[in-house]
Image (cartoon, helix red, strand yellow):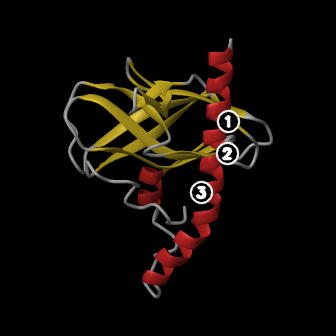
Amino acid sequence: MIKPLLMSALVAFCVGLLEAKHDAHASQNEQKHHGDHKGEKGHDDHDDHDDEKHLSESEHVRVLHAWTRAGGAGAIRIFMEIENISDDIIMIKSANIGDTIFALAGLQMKDGEPVYTPIGQVPVQPGRELVLAPNGLVFQGNWDEDLHVGDELDITLAVGDMLLDVHVVVEAKDANQHGHAGHNH
């Protein structure tokens, strides 16, 4: 009984911490990023083709900057920003590519080593977002193929009873964020 309660508390704490971290740094990163590109034609408004790759949207949820790291076949983690644009709480459940399931997992210490542990579904309040990022919450699953920088995957995200197709790009094996993080969409 205590273990599930501790896991729920850990998830709630991580979600709150990630939301606070993202809120605090989002405008600073956006200002710095856009200051670096002042005067570039079309920089603030990506063309439709770019939005198609970095943004997936339904009437309830927006998913931005889905990415994973390059590497060999085996366990991979998928990261993204999930925004609740509805007036109701949404439940983030899992993702899949065909029959391959990617479960939500949270980072925790086990025997002095960091490990990702499946956590089930996570609620996102109206107007808030859930950031899946390295060293935090992720979608994790086993993949049979090597992934190389520039490769692309299409996943299906389960949000409540809804399914949303999301485009995932493969970044460098040591990347800590999507290559377009900080851009407006």
Q: Quadrant of residue 134?
A: top left
The residue located at (52%, 74%) in the rendering is 44
Residue 123: image location, x then y, percent? 69, 33
Q: Name the residue under label 1.
A: 12
Q: Please, what is the three-letter code of the amino acid marked with disc 2?
A: Gly
Q: Do the residues labelled 3 and 1 touch (CB within 8 Å)?
A: no
Q: In this view, does 64 lie to the left or right of 167?
A: right
Between residue 104 and residue 167, name the one nearer to us. Answer: 104
Residue at image point 45% right, 53% down: 54
Cα–Cα gap, marks 3 and 2:
10 Å
Residue 58 to residue 96: above or below = below
Q: Which residue is rendered at x = 64% and y = 59% of the image?
A: 23
Label placed on residue 64 = none
Q: Position of residue 151 (x, y in %)?
A: 25, 45
Q: Image quadrant of residue 119?
A: top right
Q: Earlier in the sequence, mark 3 or mark 1?
A: 1
Residues tagged 3 and 2 counted as in contact (Cβ below 8 A) = no
Q: Are marks 1 and 2 in contact (CB under 8 Å)?
A: yes
Residue type beneath disc 1? Ala
Mark 2 element type: helix
Three-letter amino acid code of the residue under disc 3 = His
- Return the residue at label 3: 22
Q: Farthest residue toward the right? A: 87
Q: Which of marks 3 and 2 is nearer the N terminus?
A: 2
Q: Which of marks 3 and 2 is in front?
A: 2
Residue identified by numbered label 2: 16
